Amino acid sequence: SSQDIKWDEQNILATYHPADKDYGHMKIEEPKTPYSYEADETDEEIVARREPIDPEELAEKLGDAERPRSPIDRDTPDEMLTEKERIRRKSFEEKRRKHYNEFEAVRKMREKMKQMKDEDDDVDMDE
């Protein structure tokens, strides 16, 4: 049984793809985004507008940039730290101390709750 299927391609085109069919494409009509079409400043104009740089100030800034900005090492003596770094270290150590003291407080609270429960159990047994 060798039946060949023959497609009527012209009928398919006429049925499913008529010339006046709208495929949902929509033309969006909105104004263009505002943009300043004036000529931008050139690099030379920007450089000419800047104030001159003081060589000593530049050297100081470059020297600051060369220093590593790594986290403060605990082993670094306080004398080698700037005032800001000392304050930061002290703040960190205080927060760390509070954190670990909080853990200790929770442990003590659990012990206290256990003691209170034991006392309640003792009172219940006495009745």
Image (cartoon, rainbow, N blue to C red):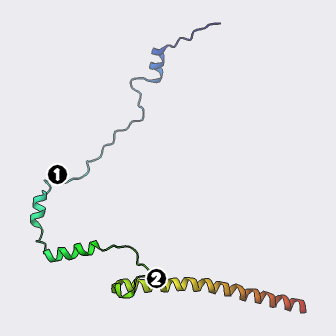
Of pointers 1 and 2, the one earlier in the residue sequence: 1
Q: Quadrant of residue 107?
A: bottom right
Q: Is residue 24 above or below residue 74?
A: above
Which kind of residue does numbered mark 2 sit on? Phe
Furthest residue to the top?
1
Which kind of residue does numbered mark 1 sit on? Tyr
Dot 2: what SS?
A: helix
Q: Quadrant of the C terminus?
A: bottom right
Instruction: Check disc 2: other Cα within 10 Å, few if <14, some if 14-19, many if 20+.
Output: few
Residue 81 falls left or right of residue 90: left
- Residue at 44% x, 23% y is 17
Q: Quadrant of the N terminus?
A: top right
| Count of marks, rendered view | 2
Q: Quadrant of residue 80?
A: bottom left
- Residue at 41% x, 28% y is 21
Q: Position of residue 108 (x, y in %)?
A: 67, 87
Determine which residue is flagged by label 2: 92
Q: Is residue 108 above or below residue 5?
A: below
Towards the viewer: 100 or 77? 77
Of discs 1 and 2, which sits in the foreground? 2
- Residue at 39% x, 26% y is 20
Q: Position of residue 75 (x, y in %)?
A: 44, 82
Q: CA distance from mark 1 to mark 2?
A: 52 Å
- Residue at 55% x, 82% y is 99
Q: Is residue 44 above or below residue 101?
A: above
The image's mark for residue 55 is none
Q: Quadrant of residue 101?
A: bottom right
Determine which residue is flagged by label 1: 37
Q: Position of residue 36 (x, y in %)?
A: 18, 54
Towards the viewer: 82 or 22? 82
